[in-house]
Amino acid sequence: MARGNQREKSREANLKKQAAQKKGNNLSGTEMQRSKEAAAEIMRQKQAAGMSHLCSKRFLLIKLAAEAKKAAADKK
């Protein structure tokens, strides 16, 4: 029975050690900086795409409002 307990304790210790290795940071300072900059650039591109989409919608709404105002003025 002692062997089974020893095996179980060893297994638990090994799992704990593997979990600690997975949790740690594996990137060096320059690699970490490079990955952060790459992620930031991707986010900037996404934000720019989102803003251009919003700006185009706003432009269309302003244009439609101006046309409606002009049409209303022509009717008078």
Image (cartoon, rainbow, N blue to C red):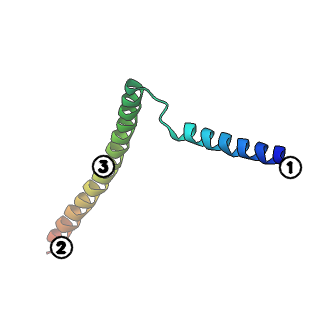
- For disc 1, the marked residue is 1
Name which of mark 3 and mark 2 comes first in the sequence. Answer: 3
The amino acid pointed to by label 3 is Met
Identify residue for label 3: 51
Q: Position of residue 31 (x, y in %)?
A: 42, 26
Residue type highlighted by circle 1: Met
Q: Which residue is mark 2?
A: 75
Q: Position of residue 3 (x, y in %)?
A: 83, 43
Q: Are marks 3 and 1 in contact (CB under 8 Å)?
A: no
- The structure residue drawn at horizontal position 14% and vertical position 70%, both measured from the top left corner, is 73
30 relative to 62 in the view: left or right = right
- Residue 71: horizontal and vertical position, in percent? 20, 67
Out of 25 and 72, give the one closest to the viewer. 25
The residues bearing labels 3 and 2 have C-alpha atoms spaced at a distance of: 36 Å
Element under disc 1: loop
Identify the residue at image location x=42%, y=26%. Answer: 28
Q: Which label lies toward us, 3 or 2?
A: 3
**Is residue 36 or residue 70 the one in the foreground?**
36
Within 10 Å of disc 2 (Cα), the crowding (few <14, some 14-19, many 20+) is few
The one nearer the camera, 69 or 3, is 3
Mark 3: which secondary structure? helix
Q: Relative to 66, is 5 above or below?
A: above
Name the residue at 35% across, 32% down: 37
* Mark 3 or 1, closer to the camera: 1
Q: Are marks 1 and 2 in contact (CB under 8 Å)?
A: no
Please determine whether, in this image, residue 21 is positioned above or below residue 1: above
Q: Amino acid at mark 2?
A: Lys
The span from disc 1 to disc 2 (Cα, nearest Å) is 98 Å
Query: Which secondary structure, mark 2?
Result: helix
